[in-house]
Every structure is written in C-alpha cells, then in structure tokens.
Amino acid sequence: MENIKINMRKILVFANILLISFLLPTVAIYAAGDNMQGSGSTGTYAKVGMAGGQFLKIGHGARGSAMAGSISAITDDLSSIFWNPAGIADIPSLTAAFDYTSWFAGFNHNFAALGVPFGDNFAFSAHFTGLSSAQMERTTIERPNGTNSFFTASDIAVGLSLAGYLTDQFSFGITTRFLNNVMGDAEASGISFDVGTKYRTGVQGIILGVSLHGLTTQLTYTGNEFNRTYKLNEALWASPVDAKLTPSPFDIPLVFRANVAADLYKDEEHYLVAALDFTTTSDSPEQFALGTEYVWNNLLALRAGYRIGHDIQGFSGGLGIKYFTGNFSGRLDYSISPLMRDMGLVNRISVTVDLGK
C-alpha cells in the first residue's frame, strides 16, 4: 500500500510538470498564429498556409506513419529524428535507416540516417531528408497555359542529433538541421532546432513523450528568379531598366507534439500497445491521433491509426517484419495512407539495419 501511495505521488507530480510543458509551447504557438492573423476591414483569417518548409511536416518511418503519427512516446529507432529526438537514445548499436515515400502530385520524399551509441547512455545520429518534384512548366498571368519553360522544386534538410538518458526513466534529444529550399532559381537556407523528452512512468508500461520542432529564425528567398527587366515608359525611345524584387521572409512550421502510450497486453509471444497523440502547429489547426501496434513473437507487427483534424489524412495502416542474418539484423516496414479529396494513396517503405552483433 505504501508503494502505491508513493507511485501515485510521483504520477501526480509529473502530471503537473507535464501540464506546464504542454501549456507553454501551446501558448507560444497560439501567439505565433495570432501574429499572422489579419485585422482591420479585411477581418481575421486562419493561420493555415502561413509557413514555408512544409516538407518538415512529412513523417519519417513507416511504423509511425502506419499508426497515424501517434508514436512519439514509443519511437525507439532513427525515425525518432522526426517524431521525437529523445527516442534516438534507444538505438542498441550502429544502425542505419532508409525511408522512401511516394508522395502525391509526383513528389518523392526520401530519408536516410546513421546512428551510433556512445558512452553508457548516449547516442548520436547524422541524417538527410529530401523532397523533390518532377519538372513543372512555368505559367504567368498572361500565359496561364504555359510558357514552354520548366523548373523543379526541392527541399533538403541535413542534420545532427544527440540523445541520452539522464535517469533510467527520463531521456532527452536535441536535433539541429541545415535547411535548403529551392524552387527554380530561387533559394532559401537556414538552421532549425528540435528538442524532445520521454518519461517512462513504470506504471502499466505508460510512457509520455513531449517534443518541440522547428525553432529557427525566418528564411528569405534569393536568386535570379527575382531579377526583372521592365520598360517603365512604352515610348519607343525609352530604355528598359533592371529591377530586383524583394521577397517577404517566411517561417517554417513550429510543431508541438504530446503523446502518451500504454501497454494493453504483454507476454512472451504477444505485445499490444496503444497511443494517443496531440499535435499543434503554427500554421494549421490542432490534431489528434489514435494508434495501435500488435507484435507477434517479436517478429511480425501489425499497425493501424486514425488522425483527427487533418484536412486530407485519416486512416492509416501497415505492417513490419524483423529479419536476422549471421552478421546483422533489421526491420522492414510498410505503411499505406489513403488521402481524402481523391488525392490517392501515400505508400511508404522503411528499412532499418542493425549492424551490431
């Protein structure tokens, strides 16, 4: 009975800490959203679409995507770089991960990472994320059907992450990224930071995860796309003049995630976990997600999830299988997400290779 009382006190204390952790980032994001709302005679408008770098909101790893993103408390591999960097502390040995997503509208999303533990409680990772398009034809107001001139768009993030355990129950993670956004001859670059924590309560396998992503200064496009030649006077004797357009700076999405996961059933052969996720960003409405994962014999996994509040994503599902060889082991995961509004299917394949013995 005394142990139960002590555990209840710990849970209540941590609940208060977690509540504060939830409120501070949420207030900051709401404040950022309020700053981007219109005023005056035009009225107010939603914060949707008020940030660039949208590729930073595309998930990594088929496991988390199959659970509709409700994984930031239990993520324990290199896909943690996206969901919650604190999960990198759980990689067991030298590990590599590769991820390919067939995104809609002809875009391809790729992710690659290499992680290695060091010391007794820490791990380090280097990673790359890229989103690229097929060729697109330029259009103008005067020529809406095309100009017979083509361009491509690509977004790149190259980063480093550090994670570790401060106690047996509490882990943290920090990520820094170099960002590069290219659209035709226009380019914008900057640095961003992510932070995350995980807390294992020791009660019914309950784990709490909190993370904040996209801390940075504003980015601004530069390049030849903004150089123009105009003729200020249509008279024949008038000479054209060179002009340079000044683009407005933009923010990347500031994202806050809070997740709680709990074991529903666990024995030597079967394992069932469920998770609830809350996500709020500086440029879109709040979202909730429910996800579950069933693992049989630590070999085969079935996953499903549903996201609430997203304009095109709802149900997701997928599966995973572990494989073992004489020199290494790993996991192959697949997820599928039907998109609303007839936007098709998003298919994601992930490969994780554990190079440790």
Image: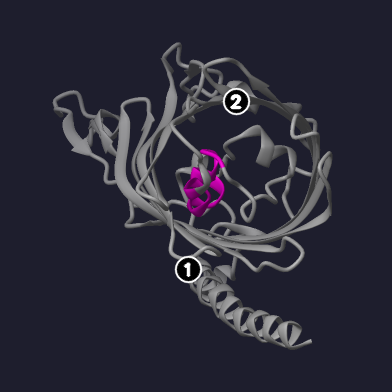
Nearest the eye: 97 or 343? 97
Looking at marks 1 and 2 on the same chain, the residue that comes earlier in the sequence is marked by 1
Nearer mark to the viewer, of 1 and 2: 2
- The quarter of the picture where residue 323 lies is top right
Answer whether residue 138 is magenta in the image.
Answer: no
Q: Which residue is mark 1?
A: 32
Give neighbour class at mark 1: few <14, some 14-19, many 20+ (Cα, 10 Å).
Answer: some
Residue 119 is situated, as x and y percent measured from the top left of the image, at 35, 48
Report the disc number at residue 59.
none
Nearest the eye: 141 or 226? 226
Residue 242 is situated, as x and y percent measured from the top left of the image, at 17, 32
Give neighbour class at mark 2: few <14, some 14-19, many 20+ (Cα, 10 Å).
Answer: some
Query: Is any part of residue 350 visible from this angle?
Result: no
Regarding mark 2 in the picture, which secondary structure is present there? strand
Q: Please name the amino acid that badge 2 sits on.
A: Gly
Regarding mark 1 in the picture, which secondary structure is present there? helix
Q: Quadrant of the N terminus?
A: bottom right
Q: Which residue is mark 2?
A: 330
Residue 324 is situated, as x and y percent measured from the top left of the image, at 63, 20
Query: Is any part of residue 134 visible from this angle?
Result: yes
Is 226 rendered above or below residue 193?
above
- The boundaries of the magenta stretch are 77-89
**Which residue is depicted at the point 67% across and 87% down?**
9
Say left or right for 237 vs 228: left
**Which residue is depicted at the point 70% across and 51% down?**
70
Nearest the eye: 50 or 314? 314
